[in-house]
Amino acid sequence: MSLIFDFLFGQYTGYDTSDIILEIVAVIFGFLSVWYSKQNNILVFPTGMISTSIFVYLLLKWELLGDMMINAYYFIMSVYGWYIWTRKVDAEHVTPISRTTAWENKMSIIIFLATLGFVFVVYNTFDKWTSWVAYVDTLTTAIFFVGMWLMARRKVENWIYWIVGDLISIPLYFFKGFTFTSIQYFGFTIIAIYGYLAWKKSLDKTPQIA
């Protein structure tokens, strides 16, 4: 049992207790945010903002620039998403769940490619191309940037991006030494699958508002 515990959590030996507590708190609020997103509940944004603000601090401290940028972007997009989700499209309805339009698909590609380019420049500037992890970080950053943008716009396809990015992040964060965060992404994957099914079911049952 001790060997299993050491394998999973041994990397925390040299960490400050306060940082471990902060990571756990961020993970809890991260779970709440994804759960509320699955439920199509506006609380996805305030809970997500708490989680991402903590992770921005921790990841900056740990010099994980790609991950830090992802969470800073999440925070900004949460503000945008909070506005979109509460914006009235007519006298009675707020922005509904919908499918991506042709324009949004094109924008998704642009955001993906622009993110790859942006992270490449940042990593070059700070000389972070030190291992294969940096390349995977670049890929997941681009995937999550698109997923967050689509989620903020209440598009059902956002879940597909989350599922792919989460699956990549599970072993990636464990390799980096952040077991709690790796467990978080495992939970995120399961919730994202159910989230996609729930949003798709809601979309199929609800008439679209023009």
Image (tube, rainbow, N blue to C red):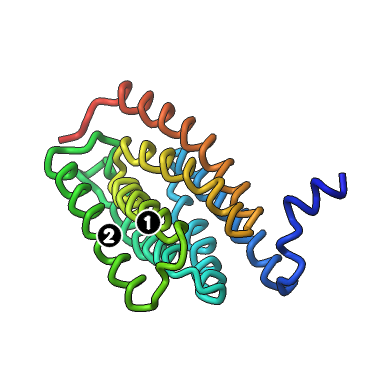
**Which residue: 77% across, 67% down?**
13
Tell me, yes or no, whether the two marked residues, 2 and 1, touch with CB atoms within 8 Å. Answer: yes
Pinpoint residue 118: horizontal percent, then vertical percent.
27, 66
Pinpoint residue 14: horizontal percent, then vertical percent.
74, 71
| Label 1 crowd (10 A; few <14 / some 14-19 / many >=20) | many
Q: Residue furthest top?
A: 205
Quarter-wise, where is residue 155 in the image?
A: top left
Q: Residue furthest right?
A: 2
Q: Specify the amino acid type for callout 2.
A: Thr
Above or below, 119 against 38 in this view is below
For mark 1, what is the residue? 141
Q: Earlier in the sequence, mark 2 or mark 1?
A: 2
**Which residue: 35% across, 51% down?**
148
Between 140 and 99, the one nearer to me in the picture: 140
Q: Specify the amino acid type for callout 1.
A: Thr
For mark 2, what is the residue? 115
Helix, strand or loop status at disc 1: helix
Quarter holding the C terminus is top left
Question: Can see residue 86?
Answer: no
Question: Can see residue 205?
Answer: yes
